[in-house]
Amino acid sequence: MELTGFDILFRLLFAHIFSDFIIQSDKVVSSKNKKKVASHIYHSLTHAVLSYCILLQWDKWYILPIIFISHLLIDLWKTNQKDGLNSFIIDQSLHLLVIISLWLTLTEQFNQLADSLMYLLKNEQFWVIAIAYLLILKPSSIFLSLFTKRWRMSHEIMNNLQNAGCWIGYLERIMILTFVLLNQIEAIGFLLAAKSIFRFGELNNAKDIKTTEYVLIGTFASFIIAIMVGLSVRGLL
C-alpha cells in the first residue's frame, strides 16, 4: 500500500508517541538514566521497528537505520544532560526534526514545504498575529509590573512560587488572545470564573483586603490588555 502526504507524517508521529510515552516502562527509563547502553539499544530498536511496520513501506528499508541511529544518539545525549524541562524539550524537538525530515524524504515535499513557508512569511496576517502574541508576553508583564507598583507590598511575594504569577499571566493572556481571535469571547468568562474559584480562599479573607484588591487590579488589567490586543488584531485582519 502506497502512502502519501500527511498519512506518513501522522503514522511516524503515532509510532514516536506510542514508543516514547506509552510502552516505554519505568524500568527501561530508569535503566537508560543509569546509562545502560543495552536499554538504549532496546528502546531505539523498538521505536525503529514499530515505525517501519506501521508505515508499511517495505521497500523503504532505510527507515529502520535512520530512526534507530538517530533515536539512539539523541537519547544518549539526553542521558548526559541535567534532567529537566530544557533537556526534555530539546530531546523531543530533535526527535520531531528527524521525523519531519524523514517524512519530507519519503514524500519528496521539500519544494512544497519551502513554498508554504515563503507564502507564510510574505503574509502580513502572520506578522500581525505574531506581534500580538509577543506583545501580551514580556512587554505586557513589564507594563503590568509598572502599573501595579504603587500598590505592591513588600511582603506580597513572600509566600508565592518563584515567577509563578508571571507565568500565570502569560498563560491567561495567551488563552484570552486565542479566544478573541477565534471569536470565542464567551470562553473568557469561564476563564475568569475558574481563576476566581481557585483564588476564592485568599480573596475571601477580609484581613487581606489589600492583597485582594492588588490581585484584582492585576487580573483585570491583564485581561483588558489581552482583549484589546485581540480586538485590535481582528480589526486589522
Image (tube, rainbow, N blue to C red):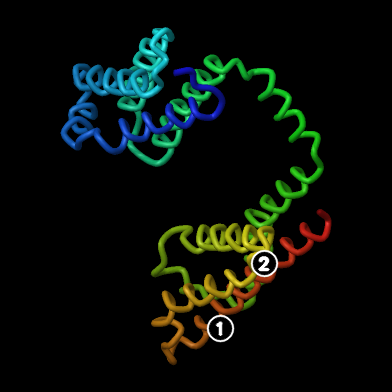
Picture layout, residue 187 above or below residue 122: below
> What is the C-alpha distance between the residues marked 2 and 1?
16 Å
Secondary structure of the residue carrying numbered label 1: helix
Furthest-front residue in view?
Answer: 1
The residue labelled by disc 1 is: 213
The N terminus sits in image quarter: top left
21 vs 213, nearest the viewer: 21
Residue at screen point 49% across, 88% down = 209
Residue at screen point 51% across, 58% down = 167
Amino acid carrying label 1: it is Glu
Mark 2 vs 1: CB contact within 8 A? no
Q: Give the foreground label among 2 and 1.
A: 1
Amino acid carrying label 2: it is Leu
Secondary structure of the residue carrying numbered label 2: helix
Picture layout, residue 209 above or below residue 32: below
How many marks the image carries: the answer is 2
Residue 118 percent coordinates (x, y): 75, 28
Of mark 2 and mark 1, the one earlier in the sequence is: 2
The residue labelled by disc 2 is: 146
**Callout 2: 10 Å neighbours few (<14), some, many (20+)?**
few
Residue 55 percent coordinates (x, y): 40, 21
Residue 44 percent coordinates (x, y): 30, 20
231 vs 61, nearest the viewer: 61
Residue 124 percent coordinates (x, y): 81, 42
Q: Quadrant of residue 117?
A: top right
